Each structure stands twice: as C-alpha cells, then as structure tokens.
Amino acid sequence: MKKHSLLLPIILLFLNQSVSASDWRQAAKSNDKINNLVQVMPGASTLMLQMEERYRNLYWSAKQKKWEFAEYQIEEMQDLIQTLMITRPKRKKTALKFFQTAFKHFPVALKKQNWSYFENSFEYMRKQCMTCHVENDHAFIVLPKQPRIGNSLVLESQTQ
C-alpha cells in the first residue's frame, strides 16, 4: 500500500514536467505562438452566438425595467463588435457600419427609461442587424422582433 502512495506523486510530477515542456505557449518560437493564437481567435459565428445572448437579454432587461442591465448588454454588444473587427478583418467594414448606426438611439432610450421609446430603438438595431447579415451573405439569419426569452439569471428575478 505504501509503494502505491509514493508512486502517485512521482507520476504526477513526471506528467506535470512533460506537459510544461511541450507547452507551445512557453516552448514555441514567437511566429509559431502568433500563428497558434490566430488559429484560436473566435470566428464571426462564435461572436454572433454571444451577440444573440446579449440581444435577448437587452430586450428582456428593458421589458422588466432593469435599465442598468440593459445598458450593460449594449456595452457588451459593442465590445463584441469591436472584437469582431479585430479578429475578422474581412468583416470590419460592415461591422464598423453596424457599430456606428445600430446603437445610436439607445442613450436616449436608457435615459428616458421608457419602454415604447426603447422598443423603437431596439427595432432600429434589429433592422441594422438584418442589414449587416444581408451584406455578409447571411440573409437567412433573421432575428425576431421579440425574443422569446432572456437567458440571464438576472432576468429571472422580477424584483428591482
């Protein structure tokens, strides 16, 4: 029994050394590191899945009058678009156009904290999303005017 208890730490030590010795983040040349990082950068589809989450949460946070959370969703959406412009240069032109137009009505909507004004701002953003999809040959991706559900735990609570 004692032999086995001593053997396990030795095996773990060996495994740890072999993993760190082959870790490209430490062992690779700079060009190889850069190439690896470029390979793992998120594609547009990955970022758009995150946008979908924010889209839903934006709508429902305003519907529930959780205005600070709505503002947070907009900020996160803007960050995702900025990330897209960096990680996918091919999409930069349309992403920049979207970034400059889609969010322009939200500051007033958030300041007023008025659902109908927000709803118009949201619809304007949705149309800008659709325009961007068309310009990127993804017209088949159609967003609903009213997402069915929000998916944040913050939106499960009806209290403010």
Image (cartoon, rainbow, N blue to C red):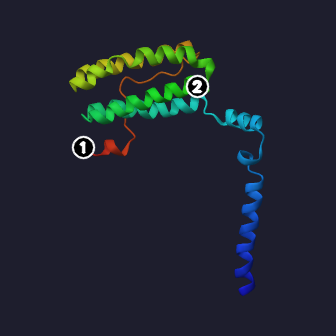
Q: How far apart are the alpha carbons under marks 1 and 2?
A: 37 Å
Residue 120, position as x, y percentages in the image: 30, 18
Query: Answer yes or no: do the residues labelled 1 and 2 have beta carbons within 8 Å?
Result: no
Q: What residue lies at 49% left-to-right and 34% top-to-bottom?
A: 50
Dot 2 corresponds to which residue? 86
Quadrant into which the N terminus falls: bottom right
Mark whose residue sits in front, 1 or 2: 2
Q: Quadrant of residue 33?
A: top right
The foreground one among 112 and 132 is 112
Q: Residue at x 75, y 70 (%)?
A: 11
Q: Tell me where residue 21 appears, x and y as whole percent.
A: 77, 55
Crowdedness near tag 1: few (<14), some (14–19) or many (≥20) residues, C-alpha within 10 Å: few
Q: What amino acid is labelled 1 in the image? A: Gln
Is 21 situated above or below 58? below
Name the residue that disc number 1 marks: 158
Label 2 Cα crowd, 10 Å radius (few <14 / some 14-19 / many 20+): few
Task: Specify which label sits upstream in the sequence, 1 or 2.
Answer: 2
Name the spot of residue 160 as percent of width and height, x first: 22, 42
Q: Is residue 129 left or right of residue 30?
A: left
Q: Amino acid at mark 2?
A: Ile
Tell me where residue 149 sits by quadrant: top left
* Residue drawn at the location 77% of the way across and 37% of the way down: 32
Where 19 sits versus 146, above or below?
below
Near-viewer residue (60 or 28): 28
The relative height of residue 18 versus residue 12 in the rendered view (above or below) is: above
